[in-house]
Image (spheres, helix red, strand yellow):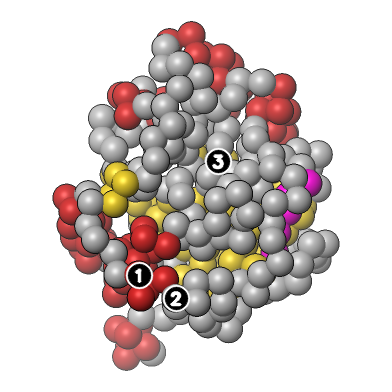
Amino acid sequence: MNTRAPVLVLAAACGACAGSRGPQDPATVRPVETVPVREVSLPLREGSLRFAVIGDSGTGDSNQRAVARALVEARARFPYTFVIMLGDNLYGPDRPGEYNRAFQEPYQPLLDAGVKFYAALGNHDSPNQRFYRHFNMNGERYYSFKPQDGVRFFALDSNYMSPEQLAWFGKELEASGSDWKIAFFHHPLYSSGRRHGPHEELRAVLEPLFVKHGLNVVFSGHEHFYERIKPQKGVYYFTSGGAAKLRRNDIARSTITASGFDTDYHYMLVEIAGEELFFQAVSRLQKVVDSGIITRPKRVEEKAAA
C-alpha cells in the first residue's frame, strides 16, 4: 500500500499560513446554513454539464459498494456523464485483481452506461494508476480536460507539487479561456478536520495561481467527511472524502465551515448551467445533506461588453 506523504519541492513562506482557520471573504454561496439545509434542486437544464464527485473510494468493501449503488440510482434521475475521483482510488495492492475489486466491479453499471471517470492521485495511490485506462489520466500525473465549451477541469497531483507541475498549471490556467475553471486533487487547502486539517504549504503555492487566473471551484478528498468551506479569496472549496471511508465526528468547530457532514458516507452531484453551478452532497442513504448554487462572477471583458 502506498502512503506517500505530500511533498512540496518549492519552499513555501509560512507567513502565508497565518490565520488559516479564519474566514477571509464573506460567504456568497447560498444557502450557507449548516446541516440540515433546505434542498436546492438540480435543475436538469437543457445543455447543462452534469457530473458526480467521489473521494477516498477505493476500498472494495461493502461501504464503497453501497455508495456505488447510490450513484447508479442517482443517475436515473440525474443523468451525469462523468465522475471526478479525488484520490485514494485504490487502497489495496497495485495489481489487476485489485483494480477489478475496488473499482471496476462496484462501478460496472456506470462504465457500461458510458460514464467516464477522471482520477487524481492520493497518498495511498501508486503513480502507476495513471496508466489505468478507466482513470483517463493518459499516463500523466496531472492533466486537464474540457468536457464542454466554457468549462475546464485541472487534475493535480498534490503528493508531489514540483516546479514543473506548477509551471504547467499556471500556463494551462492562463491559456484556458474558460468561464468555469475547476481544480481537483487529494489534499485540501482548507479543512476543519481534527485528523489532518489544512495543507498550508500547498495552499501557499497554489492559492496565488487560483486568485491570479480566476479559478472558481476546488474539490479535494483526504478527509473522510464532507465539508464546504466559506469562499476564500473568491474561491469555493469542497472536501469530499467519504465515498468508502468515514471518520465520524471529525469536523472541529471552525469559523470557515459553511456546512459539514461526518456521520455517514456520501458522494456529490454537480450541474453547471451557464453562470450557475448547482451542487448537492448526498448521503449513502440518498439524503441530501448540503446543497446550493454558486454564481460565477463576470470577467472584466464581460462587464465591459455589458
> What percent of the width, then of the height, locates residue 53?
56, 45
SS for callout 2: loop
Real-space Cα distance between discs 2 and 3?
Answer: 28 Å
**Magenta segment:** 259-263
Real-space Cα distance between discs 2 and 1?
Answer: 7 Å
- In the image shown, does 190 or 176 lie closer to the viewer? 190
Which residue is depicted at the point 48% across and 9% down?
A: 97
Which of the marked residues, 2 or 3, is nearer the chain's N terminus? 2
SS for callout 3: loop
SS for callout 1: helix
Q: Residues within 10 Å of mark 1 (few under 14, many from 20)?
A: few
The reply to whether residue 205 is in sight is: yes
Find disc 1 in the rendering and name its residue: 14
Query: Which part of the image, by quadrant, shows the N terminus?
Result: top left
> What percent of the width, then of the height, locates residue 19?
50, 77
Which residue type carries mark 1? Cys
Which residue type carries mark 3? Gly
Which residue is depicted at the point 37% across and 45% down?
A: 6
Circles 2 and 1, Cβ within 8 Å, touching? The answer is yes
Query: Which part of the image, by quadrant, shows the C terminus?
Result: bottom left
> In the rendered image of this protein, does residue 214 appear above or below residue 282?
below
Find disc 2 in the rendering and name its residue: 18
- In the figure, residue 256 lies in which quadrant? bottom right
- In the image shown, does 274 or 254 lie closer to the viewer? 254
Find disc 3 in the rendering and name its residue: 55
Question: Is residue 287 highlighted in magenta?
Answer: no
